[in-house]
Image (spheres, rainbow, N blue to C red):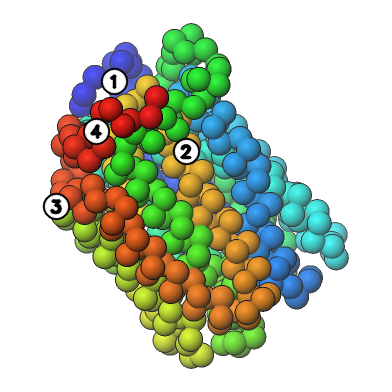
Amino acid sequence: MPDDGEPPAERPKPPLRLLHRFLLVRLSSQMAWQMQAVAVGWYVYALTGSAFDLGLIGLVQFVPFAGLALVAGHLVDRHPRRTIVTLALALECLLSVALAALALLGARDAAPIFLVIAGYGACRAFEQPATQSWLPSLVPAAEFPRSAARLSFTSQTAVIVGPAIGGLLYILGPAAPFAVVAALQVGALVLVRSLPGEERRAESEPLSWDAILGGVRFIRREEMILGSITLDLFCVLFGGVTALLPIYARDILHVGPAGLGLLRSAPAMGALVTGIVLSLHPPDRRAGPRMMVAVAIYGAATLVFGVSHTLFLSLAALMVLGAADMLSVVIRSTLVQVVAPDAIRGRVTSVASLFTGASNQLGQFESGVTAAWFGPVGSVVLGGLATLAIVALWTRRFPALLRLDRLAFKEEAMDIARESVPESSLPV
């Protein structure tokens, strides 16, 4: 394993055991998040019956996330990542308890639910860059593409199991899934404390706007990273269907909360199969073209789901959508973590997470607004068409993505980026 500046005593266990524990942390945390998403979506829609309010769930999460992301990335680079993850998970657990209490008390207004969800957005602004930038210090650099595939596989497993369990638990009452979510977050906390910590050099770079914006400047210089994360931003922003699944489950497919859990799980079922393949055969050849094709398939599957009125076809379209998204996520996340130096990896990951959060959470808001204007079917169909148009545009705007071949070696990725963006044109 390459020397990353940590003393030997900080890493007493074999890397594979550390990776397995890390994956269990992600499994517990992601499963809790997915269960809560199903429960919150159904609860809010049951209270208000408003597509706009479903979209608002994403907006109230994104605003605090966006406001804290850059500062969070800098703190991740200055302080032990384990400490930041521990604090974030502890606060998320308290927020889950608050949601359970609101459900038990029979809250009839969505406003307090939105307030708690905003707290989740603030916590995840710190949790996401801390956990994602932690993984490269636990595994050898040459193994990171395979480890990234395993991480995505684990996350998609949570996306399969979490929504299904969340939908079933909701039948017992809205408080039940929130209570189980809190228990899972406690389990994740225990696992985090079993992982080795890191000594971050807090004195090496003082807190300043120049330091905070280091990740932004790095991404602006690297065309491949900028192209990959903006591709994800706009395609998921316009092509996401998650926020509208409660409407499809209740009003179009008529399958109830348990069916909503199946719909939420379906993309991850496709992603799970893809994750197994990628963990055995990482996409270290023709990675760029594969990513572009995968996003195009994502857009086409979104179109099919939008016009479907049968559960079987809807589930099949969502599975294809999830499989395509899995390939794109593995390539993009591996590229970000391999190219970014460890000294600024937290800030780079934080900016990338900001783009991802914008695509997922603002995408929910966009879906709610367009569904209120054009209906849920019109919203999804327009999103699928927009995704296909964006892929066509990005093939011309970011040619370095089409030339990206191998992911395993930082040097080659950096060379490709610099060939595509002359040094004289790099922003200062």
Q: Calculate the distance from the C-alpha at mark 1 to the C-alpha at mark 3.
A: 27 Å
**Sequence order check, earlier mark of 3 and 4:** 3
Nearer to us of marks 1 and 3 is 3
Residue drawn at (28%, 58%), measured in percent from left and top? 395
Per the image, label 3 sits on a secondary structure element best described as loop
- The location of residue 20, given as percent across then percent down, is 33, 43
**Sequence order check, earlier mark of 1 and 2:** 1
Q: Residue furthest top?
A: 203
Residue linked to disc 2: 351
- Relative placement, left or right, of 2 versus 99 is left
Q: Residues within 10 Å of mark 3 (few under 14, many from 20)?
A: few
Q: Amino acid at mark 2?
A: Val
Q: Are marks 1 and 3 in contact (CB under 8 Å)?
A: no
Q: Is 38 placed above or below 416 here?
A: below
- The location of residue 307, given as percent across then percent down, is 48, 86
Q: Residues within 10 Å of mark 1 (few under 14, many from 20)?
A: few
Residue linked to disc 4: 422
Q: Are marks 2 and 3 in contact (CB under 8 Å)?
A: no
Q: Residues within 10 Å of mark 2 (few under 14, many from 20)?
A: many
